[in-house]
Image (spheres, rainbow, N blue to C red):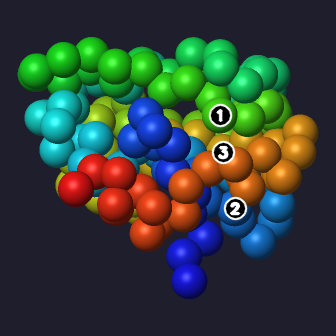
Amino acid sequence: MSNEKYTDDHEWLRLEEDGRITVGITDFAQDSLGDVVYVELPEEGQTVKEGDEVAVIESVKAAGEIKMPLGGTVVEVNTALADKPELVNSDPMGEGWFFRIEPDDTAALDQLMDEEAYKASIE
């Protein structure tokens, strides 16, 4: 069983063993965007609320944003994306992650889709 949850906006959230949540975009999203050329990430220590726009993604086709499905504090950002935004395309669920948050309440994850529901939503 996967530890990831998914949003309607094609973001994935993974609850890590330390209780933090890693956030990125799905393979479907990166494929739809095309070659990612720039990622603007939030600042470490930034407090985010549900619905806040926290990251911007620019590709050769379009620009998009990541909106938070839950609140928390940004504790780490993937600095590798500054020099290698293409990691979002090559490994969106791994090395292409965006940031990690210390969630206010992990119960909010229960409102998101599991992998099976997400796959059904994009078919």
**58 up-or-down from 109: above or below:** above
Q: Residue furthest right?
A: 104
User: Which of disc 2 and disc 3 is earlier in sequence?
Assistant: 2
Q: Amino acid at mark 1?
A: Pro
**Residue 78 in sight in this render:** no
Residue 38 occupies quadrant: top left
Mark in the foreground, 3 or 2: 2
Other-residue count near label 3 (Cα within 10 Å), few / some / many at <14 / 14–19 / ≥20: many
**114 up-or-down from 112: above or below:** below
Q: Percent position (x, y) of residue 104?
A: 89, 39
Left or right: residue 80 versus residue 114 is left
Circle 2 SS class? strand
User: Which of disc 1 and disc 3 is earlier in sequence?
Assistant: 1
Q: Amino acid at mark 2?
A: Leu
Q: Percent position (x, y) of residue 80?
A: 42, 42
* Residue of label 3: 100
Circle 1 SS class? loop
Residue under the point 88% across and 45% down = 105
Circle 3 SS class? strand
Is residue 21 or residue 122 the one in the foreground? 122
User: Which of disc 2 and disc 1 is earlier in sequence?
Assistant: 2
Given contact means CB atoms under 8 Å apart, are the residues at marks 3 and 1 in contact?
A: no
Given contact means CB atoms under 8 Å apart, are the residues at marks 3 and 2 in contact?
A: no
* Residue of label 1: 69
Q: Amino acid at mark 3?
A: Arg
In which quadrant will I find the C terminus?
Answer: bottom left
**35 up-or-down from 45: above or below:** below
**Residue 13 in sight in this render:** yes
Residue under the point 79% across and 31% down = 71
Residue 64 occupies quadrant: top left
* Residue of label 2: 15
Other-residue count near label 1 (Cα within 10 Å), few / some / many at <14 / 14–19 / ≥20: many
